[in-house]
Image (cartoon, rainbow, N blue to C red):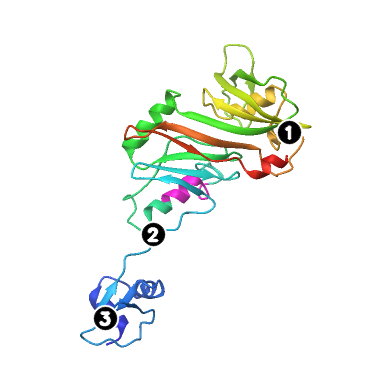
Amino acid sequence: MTLRARLAALHPGASRRQLKRWLEGSRVRVNGAVVRRGDVPVRPGDRVELAAPPPPAFPAPLAPIHEDAAILVVDKPAGLLTIATARERERTAYRLLMDYVAGGRPPGRERVFIVHRLDRETSGLLVFAKSPVAKRTLQAQFAARTPERVYVAVVEGRVRDAEGTLRARLDPAPRARVRAMREGPRGKEAITRYRVLERRAATTALELLLVTGRRGQIRAQLAAAGHPIVGDVVYGSRRNPLRRVCLHATRLAFVHPDGRRVSFESPPPAAFGRV
């Protein structure tokens, strides 16, 4: 009997294509040794085993930061959506992670849940929940503004004050570019605290702490203050040396669903130092 025939007898529900994948994937062992050819003869007393599938590779271009039974924290690159839009549905952080946690298992057995988002143009830390309970726990914290969310940005010009607070009301109209309004009852309040990390000849590196978490908040407020983020041409930047917006989510801290306070770090890209 050939190895392929023995496998078919041991796994009658497997298709020929699946048997081929098992062999090519080095999952089949005969008497403890990996065998990749199905036409190899086997004797009645030979032990044929099918090894468990290897764990799925972590999806590029995301970088793993932390994973446990309740949460998944990743480092998202600039240029990748967090979740689908009308124009882009497949290449998103959410879709890549859904495929990763499924790992070949039946649909619906394993999945991730959106907790918060980063703009496509922003890189850095994102947390996803791995159960509905964890999702509700984390989203309640974000709604209450209790997580610590810290960003690093390189902005145009030299910021005068060593630290301060940016306050504005953001235009609620659904458009690509959020507009910051200094006065008036319209819009949603946005608050960001900042401190200067380094002043350079024509730019300033800032650390920014979100107090509120509005869409496009940091980008709109810095542009309104006369210091658009380098590379943020949508908000008026005149320079784009890295071909990306120089904004990175560098620290994220919150209460884990199990009750522990957890904190994660992602250093800003080294290229920020050359801007």
Q: Position of residue 222 (x, y in %)?
A: 66, 26
Front position among marks 3 and 2: 2
Work out which quarter of the rendered image holds the N terminus and state it: bottom left
Work out which quarter of the rendered image holds the C terminus and state it: top right
Q: Position of residue 11 (x, y in %)?
A: 25, 73
Q: Position of residue 71 (x, y in %)?
A: 38, 41
Tell me which secondary structure the magenta stretch mostly adopts: helix
Q: Secondary structure at mark 3?
A: helix
Q: First in sequence: mark 2 or mark 1?
A: 2
Q: Secondary structure at mark 1?
A: loop
* Magenta stretch, residue numbers: 89-98
Mark 3 belongs to which amino acid?
Answer: Arg
Q: Which residue is mark 2?
A: 55
Q: Which residue is mark 3?
A: 6
Residue at 66% x, 38% y is 245
Q: Which residue is mark 1?
A: 237
Q: Position of residue 177 (x, y in %)?
A: 64, 30
